Image: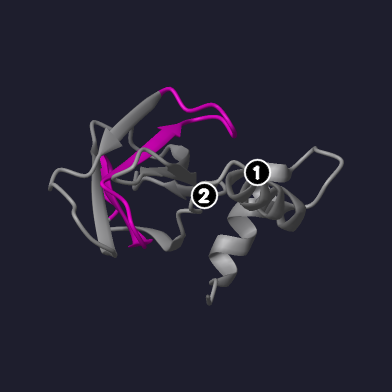
Amino acid sequence: MCIRDSDKVAWENRASGKPYSGFNLFVSKVVKTLVAGKTWQLIKDVQATNITSSSADITGYTDNAQLVRVEYGTSPGVYTAFADESSGRTEAGTFTVSLSGLASGTTYYYRVVTQSPDGVWGETGEYSFTTAS
């Protein structure tokens, strides 16, 4: 499993202000999932692309998700909106979730959550992007 630097930074962002590192947060989530007898949902290579003044695409890779959702908002750790991938998913691969109706010149914070066919959820750290002015 190869994780991009941006994915590592996203976990560090999510752990910001906590008494543990992003790596420890990630490992804790994986261990809790495995102890519960579930399969960890890998989500990686996440990035914001095609950013305009009112929209952006969130792309990445997931290894067994039926549903891919992007939760987002304008404050770190506070996700007040979400968008789902529009196509039905049945296998591992890349995904694109389009966000629209965004405010111009605004920084958005987001994470990706997934659900597998057997109902197991996965999640990422926190990423950000700024819309064009």
On the rendered structure, is 117 left or right of 120? left
x%, y% of residue 48? 37, 56
In this picture, which residue range is highlighted in magenta? Answer: 51-80
Screen quadrant of the C terminus:
top left
The residue carrying mark 2 is 124
Query: Looking at the image, which residue is at 41% across and 34% down?
Result: 71
The residue carrying mark 1 is 32
On the rendered structure, is 123 left or right of 55? right
Query: Looking at the image, which residue is at 33% across and 57% down?
Result: 64
Query: Relative to the observer, which residue lies in front, 116 or 38?
Result: 38
On the rendered structure, is 18 left or right of 51? right
Residue kind at label 1, given as amino acid type = Lys
Query: Relative to the observer, which residue lies in front, 108 or 72?
Result: 72
Above/below status of 103 relative to 25: above
Query: Looking at the image, which residue is at 59% across and 41% down?
Result: 36
Q: Earlier in the sequence, mark 2 or mark 1?
A: 1
